[in-house]
Structures are given as structure tokens and as C-alpha cells.
Image (cartoon, grey):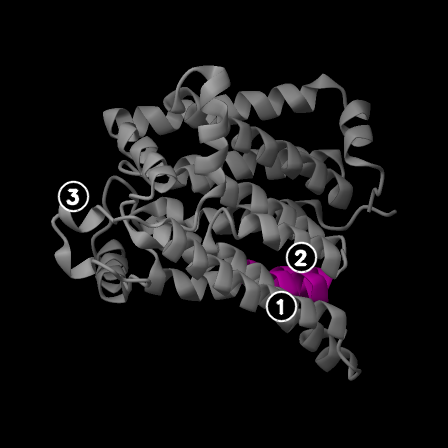
Amino acid sequence: MDRRPFLQIVEVHGISWILAALLGAIAQFRMIVTIIGADYGDSIAAAQGVVAGTPHWQVYQSRVLGPWVAQFLSGPVGSFHAAHVLYTIGLYFAAGLTMLVTAYRLYGVTAAWIAFLCFHLLCMVLINSRWHYIWDGGDLLSFTLFCYFVLADKDWRWMTGLFCVSILNRESAFFIAAWMILYPFLVAILDRARPRLPMALAGMACLVAGALLVQGLRVVLLHREIGPGLFGMPEMAGRSFHPHLHDNMIYLFDAIRHPTMEFNILIVVLLLAPLVLTGLLARRFGRRYLGLGLAHSLIVLSLPIVGVLSETRVLFDLVPFMAIGFAALIQGQEKPA
């Protein structure tokens, strides 16, 4: 693995990576507004609702990082709308550049471009025609960094820092804490040794503190959730958990039995892909990929319960792992230090 500093690697490879990451980010945003159209304004309004304490759903109220940054930027750039656009493009830029550096450090320059291309193609495939929230791009960056931290064998302090920022973006950060708890015990079982307790204890602390923070933000900042009245769904009012298992099972079975021109069957394939990748990568590269794959397998298992699979953007958390995994399988071996 190439352990040179991030900025030094970017400098060595010149302006091409920065231009590619910027072009990819702009292309992603153009695809978003092309597919969603005028309804993209509703996604911006959802972020403004978090700032005002009137989110669509109270579960959104704890997702303050993106809305607060956009609110902070709205003064210099002139409007919340413009700040929302710039922040979204900036997240795609940062995630794409991080993907290039991560794959390069692991497998070399060819794999970096493969991972980068897979990353953007998967994102484009998963953009849906109704919503693209400001925290969706944050998940892409968080889980790209998570994949790198795991594969680079970063210690508990790096993981804790990533969790502390990511939990303000979305509750998907709890999967980072779950990995911190489970991975030391997985290694201990494989090695027949004692687990690395600092990582596990830090994960438990993140899990408890994160749960308290999320609930606290919802209680303190929430004035009123407007989704029940706005969407005609009064039965969903006041819920801290939105189960979607029944509707998702119908969606998945329909995708298998009645594929459409929108390639809904592809969502089934992409939902299963991380499970297959976990087996292939663990067999070829060992325990780090097994641990990383298990964390993403937990995401796969949770999505039919808490996500709306017809809003295909909910699979964004899986994109960095799939992009890096595809590049790893194509490249065939890790780059020597």
C-alpha cells in the first residue's frame, strides 16, 4: 500500500485527478437535475426544513450537517438554493477524489480509474426520479473514507472521528460503530486470540453516544414534522422508525417477476452484489475484506426494513464498497508498500 500523504499523491498525479473528480461531480449533478427535474426543489425544501425545525419527518431532524453547512454558505453565495447545489457538487467531488486516492494506494493507478468509473456509474444508475437529499452525498464520502480506513487498518481514533462527523449527516453512521464492535471479535475468533478491546470499546461508546445525540437533536430542534400533512400520511406522524418491509418485498418480487424498461431488476442485483463481493474478496484478500464486507452485508439486510427501495438512492451506502471491490477483483493483487 502506498502510504504517502493524500495531497502528495494528488500532486504527483497532477491536475488530471482533480479535473476528473470535478467533471464527475458536475456530471452527477447534471444527471440529478435532469432526472428529477423541477421536483429537485422539494429536496432543497427538505434540507431547509431541517434548519427551521420543520422537517418532512422527525427522523430527518438529526441530519443537520448538510443543512447547516448549506445555511452557513447561503450568505456568501446569495441563497440557500445555490449553497445546496454547491455543497452537493462539493461532496461528489470530494468522494470521487477520495475514491481515486484510495484505490491508487491499494492497487495502483489503473485500479484507481476503474474504481472511479464504477463509483460514478453506480451513482448514476441509483439516482431516482423523486428525491436526492443533501445527506445522500455525505453518505458517499463517509463510506468511501470508511472503506479506506478499514483496508488501511486505521486505529479506533480514526474510526471514532469519522463516526462523530458522519452521525451528524445520517444515522447510517451506526454501521461504522457496529463494525468497530464486531471486527475485533471476528479477528480474535480467526486468530484464536483476545480481541482488540480499544476498538470494540470505542465502538460501543460511539453507539451509545450516537443514539443519545440523534434522539437529543430530534427532541431539542424539532418544532413540527410536516410530512404527515404534506403527503397525506397521518399514520406516520411522530414515528422515530419507519418500517417498509412489506412494501419493499412487493417491490423486489415485482422486479423479479415483471422487469421494466427502468431495469428495476438491476436494484435486486445491486442489493445482492455486496454479499457476493464479500465472499470473493475475503477469499482472495483475507480478513480485512471479510470484515468490511460483513459491515456492508448488515446494510444490505437493513435496507429492506428501513429503506424505501423504490427510492434507489438508499443504496448509496453500498456504492464505495462495490466500486473498490470491482477494482480489486480486476486488478488481482494489492500494491506493495
Q: Amino acid at mark 3?
A: Leu
Residue drawn at the location 30% of the way across and 44% of the way down: 55
Query: Vertically, is 219 above or below 52?
Result: below
* Cα–Cα span, label 2 and label 1: 9 Å
Dot 3: what SS?
helix
Question: Does residue 275 appear in this view?
Answer: no
Identify the element where label 2 is drawn: helix
Q: Is residue 194 shown left or right of residue 241?
A: right
Q: Residue 171, image x and y in percent?
A: 46, 56
| Residue furthest to the bottom | 192
Q: Residue at x 40, y 53 (%)?
A: 220
Magenta span: 275-294
Give residue 205's mark: 1
Q: Is residue 334 above or below residue 71?
A: below
Q: Write down the quadrant of residue 208 in the picture.
A: bottom right
Q: Amino acid at mark 1?
A: Ala
- Residue depicted at x 32% and y 62%: 240
Q: How far apart are the two marked residues, 3 and 2, measured between alpha carbons?
A: 37 Å
Residue 3 figure quarter: top right
Q: Is residue 57 visible?
A: yes
* Residue tagged 3: 230
Q: Which residue is mark 2?
A: 160
Assign a secondary structure to mark 1: helix
Q: Which mark is residue 89?
A: none
